[in-house]
Image: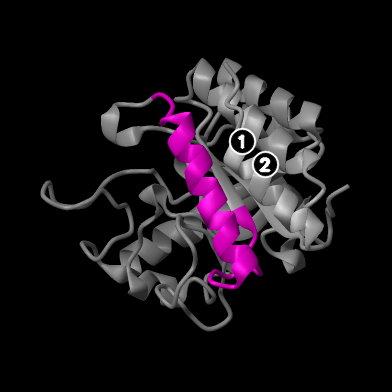
Amino acid sequence: MTAPLAATRVELARWRDAGLTLPVWWRDDDAVAPTPALERLLGLAGRLQAPLHLAVIPATATHELADRLSDASGVFVLVHGWQHANHAPPDQKKAEFGPHRDTETMCAEIASGRSLLKEIFADQMLPVFTPPWNRLSQDVADRLGALGFLALSTFTPRTAKYAAPGLVQVNTHLDPVAWKSGGGLLDPGLLDAQIARQLEARRSGDADNAEPYGLLTHHLVQDDPTWSFTESIVETLLGSGAARWTPPLHECARSRPYA
C-alpha cells in the first residue's frame, strides 16, 4: 500500500502558501551492473521524470552498466568509494575510508576509482564522492579537492564536519530502508513524521534550505513496500507545487542540465 504521507502533504502546502521552494535531489547507492532491480529503478525515475544520481562502485563497475546508462536521460554517476569494503575494526561502525587506514593508500584508491568511472562513463560521471556507509576520515575529506572532486555526499544535514577548501557538501536526508531491523521499509508513519519535521525546520529557518533535500535509496535491497514508498514520496514532492529538482552541484551539471 502506498503511504499517504499526510503530514508531509500538509507541510508542503504550507511551503506553497508561503511561496517557498524546496530544492530536492535523488541518490541511489551501490550500482555495478544491469539488474532487474536497476531496471525497476530506471523505469520509476523515467516515469516520474526524476533526475537520478547513481553512486557506482568503481572496482566492480561493468561496461554493461555504462552501455545501459548511455542513453538514459537524466541519469548521473557518482563515485561510490572503491570496492565498498569494510576496513573498520569489528567493534566500530563500518567504513571503507575511515581513520583505520593509511591516508595515502585511501587517496590512491579514490583517485583510481574516479579515473576508472570517468573512463567508463565519460561526462555522465560527476566529480562527487560518496563514501560507502556515508563515513570517511577528515584527512581524506581534506584531500578530495586535490583528487579532482567538487562535492562530497554523505547522510544527514551537512555540518562543519568534513568541511574542506573547495569542497561542497550535498548530503542525503531520507533513507526509507529499515537497516537496523534487517531491511524492508521503516514504519511509513514515522517516515512521514520525519519528513514533515525536516521540512518544517527548513521552512522556519532552523535548518539549511540551500542544501538540496536528498532522497537516498538502495535499489538492490528494496522490497515492494519500499519501492511503493519511494514512488509515493517522489510523487508527493513533484505534485506539491513547492519542490523542484536541483543539481547537487550546479557546476558539475552544466554540461548535462536537468530538463
**Mark number, residue 6:** 1
Rendered view: 191 above or below 109: above
114 to the left or right of 73? left
217 to the left or right of 48? left
Would residue 246 be seen by someone viewing this image from the given angle? no
Residue underneath mark 2 = 9
Percent of width and height locating residue 164: 48, 80
Q: Residue at x 60, y 21 (%)?
A: 2
Percent of width and height locating residue 139: 34, 75
Q: Quick one: 204 or 178, which is closer to the camera?
A: 204
Q: Residue at x 71, y 42 (%)?
A: 237
237 to the left or right of 27? right
- The residue lying furthest to the left in this view is 91
Q: Quick one: 151 or 204, which is closer to the camera?
A: 204
Q: Residue at x 78, y 31 (%)?
A: 48
Q: Quick one: 126 or 121, which is closer to the camera?
A: 126
> Quarter of the image containing the N terminus?
top right
Q: Quick one: 6 or 225, which is closer to the camera?
A: 6
Crowd class of label 1 (few under 14; some 14 to 19; many from 20; radius 10 Å): some
Element under disc 2: helix
Span shown in magenta: 184-213
Percent of width and height locating residue 225: 51, 19
Q: Is residue 198 magenta?
A: yes
Give the CA distance from mark 1 to mark 2.
5 Å
Tag 1 near tag 2, CB within 8 Å: yes
Q: Is residue 35 magenta?
A: no
Percent of width and height locating residue 98: 28, 61
Rendered view: 44 above or below 237: above
